């Protein structure tokens, strides 16, 4: 074809998108079980889930107006600076974790403390691996700002997706279902129903293609048209998937994993079923998009897939009521130190020694051991 289309190239692009969607969901879900190193966890309540489509719509339409009435290059420059500033922590954390997993670094820590009088201005500990991770993060950030390379964009997007799934928690299964259903309606309206608002064009598609930010994962539609050097610097003809289509189902899937862990279910049935349903929903999205040659609201397929799959699994396992009543706020059983009250004993050391040394005597109220007549007869026969 004139645009260089080939089925093999499109198939490779779609496979890459599916892999880049599944990997951060899997990693982020397992990391969310133990994010003790991070203190910035966010939990979404039911009331907040109901407001998500409202605030999402306001943000999306605001971006649409900015792209239409201001210079898009200026809008992208400002938003790139803001996004890089906010999301650099996710890239730093990804580099740090990979470095600690793959290499045997010297983890001796150094303590930096800056005080003014009796007040601490700065107080933190670090190792050489932290300094190296910061340095690499700065290099990635500078290179991305100046080149807008699609590979660097994917690195930023994937690190951000992993951290978002790890940190953003749903307080209950009901909240997760409400969030998915609300964003289902949001996605459908702004892709298919926004023509009346925008004057004929899809607001979602205009914003997704007009913003040159690492808020989506990209892959060239036909890698076979380019040599390796050209492939690094191409700027158009990408297949793409928005981060919202990864993060929103991802935090729901991570909730399913928490349910499996709390109920101590073997083989993590709800997590596995929801991951498979997400995969099927994503494949359905891609097939419909490819057949009709038009962008599709991925949550149109992903939201029902995640909710229905887990609900059917609960019904078949006779755990549906347990699933819909699942709440992450329910406290786990406390340890002995947390739940056992400690009585305060007052006295001096000599009193304590006397108490320990004093032999225990049987209580006067204790009754002698009663032996039944049958037992006595058995003993006499043995003699």
Image (cartoon, rainbow, N blue to C red):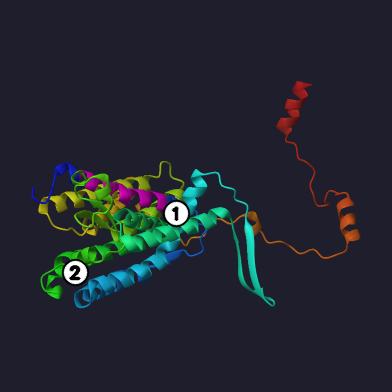
Q: Looking at this rendering, what residue extends furthest in the front direction?
A: 229
Residue 156 appears in which quarter of the rendering?
bottom left
Main SS class of the magenta portion in the image: helix
Question: Which residue is depicted at the point 25% across and 70% down?
Answer: 73
Determine if residue 81 is in view. Answer: yes
Give the residues in magenta.
11-28
Determine if residue 277 is in view. Answer: no
Label 1: few (<14), some or many (≥20) within 10 Å? many
Residue 16 position within the rendered picture, expressed as x and y whole percent measured from the top left: 27, 47
Residue 238 appears in which quarter of the rendering?
bottom left
Above/below status of 267 relative to 196: above
Separation (CA) of disc 2 from disc 1: 33 Å
Q: Which residue was labeled with disc 1? A: 94
Above/below status of 307 relative to 120: above
Q: Is residue 24 magenta?
A: yes
Question: Which residue is depicted at the point 30% across and 46% down?
Answer: 276
Question: Which residue is depicted at the point 10% across and 54% down?
Answer: 292
Label 2: few (<14), some or many (≥20) within 10 Å? many
Q: Which residue occupies the foreground of this view, 107 or 254?
A: 107
User: Which secondary structure, mark 1?
Assistant: helix
Residue 76 position within the rendered picture, expressed as x and y whole percent measured from the top left: 28, 69
Q: Tell me the number on the disc at residue 203.
A: 2
Q: Which residue occupies the foreground of this view, 35 or 223?
A: 223
């Amino acid at each position: 074809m004139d645009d260089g289309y080939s089925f093999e190239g499109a198939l490779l692009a779609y496979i890459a998108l599916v892999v880049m969607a599944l990997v951060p969901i899997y990693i982020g879900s397992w990391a969310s079980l133990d994010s003790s190193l991070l203190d910035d966890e966010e939990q979404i309540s039911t009331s907040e889930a109901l407001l998500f489509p409202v605030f999402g719509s306001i943000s999306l339409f605001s971006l649409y107006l900015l792209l239409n009435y201001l210079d898009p290059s200026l809008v992208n420059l400002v938003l790139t600076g803001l996004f890089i500033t906010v999301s650099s922590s996710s890239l730093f954390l990804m580099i740090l974790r990979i470095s600690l997993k793959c290499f045997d670094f010297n983890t001796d820590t150094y303590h930096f403390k800056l005080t003014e009088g009796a007040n601490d201005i700065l107080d933190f500990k670090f190792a050489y691996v932290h300094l190296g991770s910061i340095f690499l993060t700065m290099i990635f950030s500078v290179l991305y700002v100046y080149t807008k390379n699609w590979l660097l964009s994917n690195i930023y997007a994937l690190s951000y997706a992993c951290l978002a799934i790890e940190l953003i928690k749903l307080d209950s299964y009901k909240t997760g279902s409400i969030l998915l259903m609300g964003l289902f309606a949001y996605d459908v309206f702004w892709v298919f129903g926004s023509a009346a608002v925008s004057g004929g064009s899809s607001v979602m598609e205009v914003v997704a293609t007009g913003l040159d930010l690492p808020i989506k994962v990209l892959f060239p539609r036909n890698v076979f048209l380019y040599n390796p050097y050209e492939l690094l610097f191409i700027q158009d003809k990408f297949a793409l998937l928005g981060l919202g289509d990864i993060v929103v189902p991802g935090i729901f899937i991570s909730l399913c994993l928490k349910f499996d862990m709390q109920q101590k279910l073997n083989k993590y049935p709800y997590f596995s079923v929801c991951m498979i349903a997400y995969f099927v929903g994503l494949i359905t999205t891609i097939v419909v998009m490819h057949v009709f040659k038009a962008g599709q609201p991925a949550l149109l397929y992903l939201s029902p897939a995640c909710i229905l799959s887990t609900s059917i699994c609960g019904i078949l396992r006779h755990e549906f009521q347990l699933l819909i009543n699942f709440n992450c706020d329910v406290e786990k059983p406390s340890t002995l130190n947390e739940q056992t009250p400690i009585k305060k004993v007052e006295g001096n050391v000599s009193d304590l020694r006397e108490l320990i040394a004093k032999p225990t005597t049987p209580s006067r109220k204790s009754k002698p051991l009663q032996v039944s007549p049958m037992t006595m007869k058995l003993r006499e026969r043995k003699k």
